[in-house]
Image: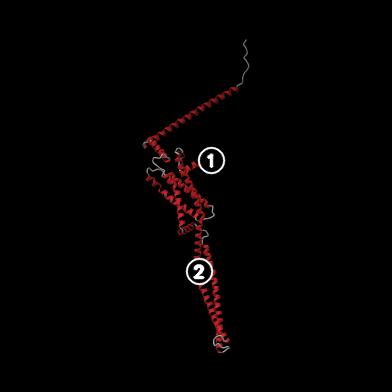
Amino acid sequence: MNKIIDFAHDFKRFTWWLAGVDENIISSCTQGDQRKHSNLGIFVLLSFFISSFVFTYLGSITNPGSFFNIFIGLLAGFFIASIERMSMINLRWQGSWKATLILIIPRIFITLFLGLIVGEAVCLNVFSPEIHRQLALDKGKALSEITNSTSSAFGEIERLELQNQELFQQIKDKESERDKLYKSFIGEAEGWSGTMKFGTGPVYQQKKTQYDEISSELQDLRFANQQVIDANNKRITTLKKERDENIEQSEKSLPKYAGLLMNIEALEKYSSSNLSLFFWRMMIILFFIALDSAPVLMKTFSLSSKQDSYEAKLEKQRKSITEEAAKSYKTDQEINDATEQIRKDKSVLLANSVYDQARIMEEDLVKKQLDTWYKQQLMSISKQPINFNTPPSKN
C-alpha cells in the first residue's frame, strides 16, 4: 500500500514537472490548482505517447520493417512534448486578456499544425483497408496505361495481324468460289442444275474448265498467302516478345510499397467519392486538434489577475524580490559603494585571518623549541655519572 502511495506521489510530482511548475510553490497552492496542473502534465504526457505512435506509424509506411522508425517516433514525441511543456512554462498572465491572448496565438498555430498531422496519420491507420483498395485500383489503372502505351508503341503487331486476316479472307473467298463451281458442274453432270440434262455435255465441260482454273488459282493463292502469313507470324512473335519485356520492365519500375504521399492521395481520392468517409475523417482531425489545444486553452482561461494561484504566487515572489532590491540599493552609486565596502570588509577579514594564522604558527614554534630544549636538558642530566662516595670525616 505504501508503494502505491509513493508511486502516486511521485507521479503527481512528475506531472507537475511536465506542466512546468515549481513543486515548492504548487505544494502550497489549493487542491484545485494542484489538480489543474497535474491534468496539464497528463495532457503533455499523452501528447508524447500519441506523437510517438503517430510518427512511428508514418515511418513504417515509408520504410516498413525498420527499427529506426521507433527511434524517430520517440524523438518526435519528445520534441512535441518539449514544445508543450515550454508553452506551459511561458504562458503567464500579462495584465489583460488582450495581451494574454496575443501571447498564445503562435501556440494555437502550432496546435493546428500538430493536430492536423496527428489526425491525418490516425486516419491513415483507421481507413487503411479503404486506402489499400484505392491503391489497388490505382495500380491496376497504371498497369493498364502502361500496357496501352506500350501496345501503341508496337502498332505494327496490329497491322500485321490485320494483314493476316485479310490474307486468310482471300483464301476463304477463293475456296467459296471454287466450291460454288464444283456444285455447278456436278449438278450439270447429274442433271439437277443448269441445263437439267444428264451427262457431260458442252456446258459441263465449260464449268469443269472454270472449276479447274479456280482450283489452280486457289493453290497459287494459298502458297503465296501462306508465305506472307508465316513471315508476319514470325515478326509478330518477335514484336510481342519485345512488347512483353517492355511491359515487364515498366511494371518493375512501379514502387513495391506505397509511400506516405501515395497513401494520402489514395485517402483523398476515396474520401472525395465517399461522403461518409470524408465526414469521419474531418471529425478525427478536429478531435486531435481539440485534444492538442486543450492544455493551452485550459491554462489560458484559468488565468486571472485576482486568482491566488501558482502564477500569482510567482508574480508575488518576483515583486517582493524586486522591492527588496530596490530598498537595499536605490541607485547605481549606492550599489558601487556597497560593493566597495564589501570588498574592504573582506580584505580586513582576510588580513585578520592571516595575522591570527601567523600568531598561532609562532606560538606553536616557540612551544616546539621549549619542548626540544627540555628534552635536551633531560638527556644531558641522564648521561652524567652519579657519585655515591661520601667525603671523609675530619674527626
Image coords of residue 89 (percent x, y)? 44, 44
Q: Nearer the viewer, mark 2 or mark 1?
A: 1
* Residue 114 in sight: no
Is 326 or 128 nearer to us in this picture?
A: 128
Q: Quadrant of residue 320?
A: top left
Residue depicted at x 54% and y 67%:
244
Image coords of residue 254 (percent x, y)? 51, 62
Is 85 or 195 nearer to us in this picture?
A: 195
Is 333 or 131 nearer to us in this picture?
A: 131
Residue assigned mark 2: 151
29 relative to 384 in the view: left or right? left
Residue depicted at x 51% and y 72%:
158
Q: Tag 1: residue type? A: Ile
Q: In this view, does 283 lie above or below 340?
A: below
* Residue 290 in sight: yes
Image coords of residue 178 (percent x, y)? 55, 82
Image coords of residue 261 (percent x, y)? 48, 57
Callout 1 secondary element: helix
Give the quarter of the figure containing the C terminus. Answer: top right
135 relative to 324 in the view: left or right? right
Is 288 or 371 nearer to us in this picture?
A: 288
Callout 2 secondary element: helix
Q: How is the image coloured?
A: secondary structure
Most extreme residue toward the top is 395
Q: Quadrant of residue 168?
A: bottom right
Q: Tag 2: residue type? A: Ser
Q: Is residue 281 above or below residue 367?
A: below
Total marks placed:
2
Residue assigned mark 1: 4
Q: In this view, does 298 lie above or below 339?
A: below
Q: Which of marks 2 and 1 is nearer the N terminus?
A: 1
* Mark number, residue 343: none
